[in-house]
Image (cartoon, rainbow, N blue to C red):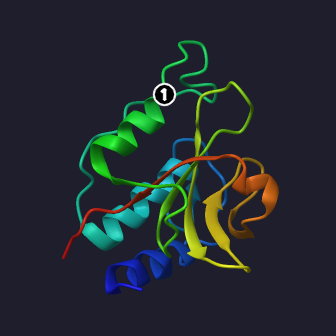
Amino acid sequence: MSEQAQKIVAAARGWIGTPYRHQASCRGAGSDCLGLLRGVWREVLGEEPQKIPAYSMDWSEPSRVEALWQGAERHLVAKKTEDEAIGDVLLFRMREGAVAKHLGLAGQIGPKATFIHAYSGHAVMESPLSAPWKRRIVARFRFPEGS
């Protein structure tokens, strides 16, 4: 595991217990899944690469635009979905035919795989990457190399 991947996972685990708050990105106060990714980016890489516009709970669904996926492709490095590594960014499609709109960070890989995410109705948590979650993964990314 790279030093940067270790930093990513440690930073993400530092957010565990942060309450779920739509559009928030403040460790300990509130975060959604994108806010968690943004907060980890700030802690590991520094300034965020893009200002995030306001978004609704159903963002991208009415327009069917893969906004989250497109943003990930702009700022992260795409990987093959089977190329697992600690610290990867996982993009999930929550329903068949819906746009992908949930993110998590790989905490562990292998038979006891986990991911760290902010999930609506819960706090930031580290969950088992169980079969129901695995089958929802539509893309995998890594953070760009940083300092």
Q: Residue furthest left?
A: 147
Above or below, 6 relative to 34: below
Instruction: Tell me the SS state at disc 1.
Output: loop
Q: Position of residue 69 (x, y in %)?
A: 45, 37
**Residue 123 in the image: above or below residue 99:** below
Q: Quadrant of residue 46?
A: bottom left
Looking at the picture, how far across and down is residue 133, in whole percent?
74, 55
Quarter of the image for the C terminus: give it: bottom left
Q: Is residue 135 above or below residue 61?
A: below
The crowd level at tag 1 (other Cα within 10 Å; few <14, some 14-19, many 20+) is some
Q: Residue at x 56, y 54 (%)?
A: 31
Residue at screen point 70% across, 52% down = 119
Q: Along the line of sight, which residue is nearer the eye, 121 or 65?
A: 65
- Tell me if 5 is positioned left or right of 102 in this view: left
Residue under the point 68% across and 75% down: 113
Q: x%, y% of residue 22?
A: 60, 42
Identity, as a three-letter code, of the amino acid under mark 1: Glu
Q: Nearer the viewer, residue 19 or 79?
A: 79
| Left or right of 101 in this view: 89 | left
Most extreme residue toward the top, as rendered? Answer: 63
Which quadrant is the N terminus positioned in?
A: bottom left
Residue drawn at 50 percent across, 29 percent down: 55
The residue carrying mark 1 is 66
Q: Is residue 23 above or below residue 64?
A: below
111 with respect to 91 (left or right): right
Instruction: Report the number of discs.
Output: 1
Instruction: Please state which of residues 49 and 82 is positioned toward the viewer in this rendering.
Output: 82
x then y, percent, for residue 97: 69, 24
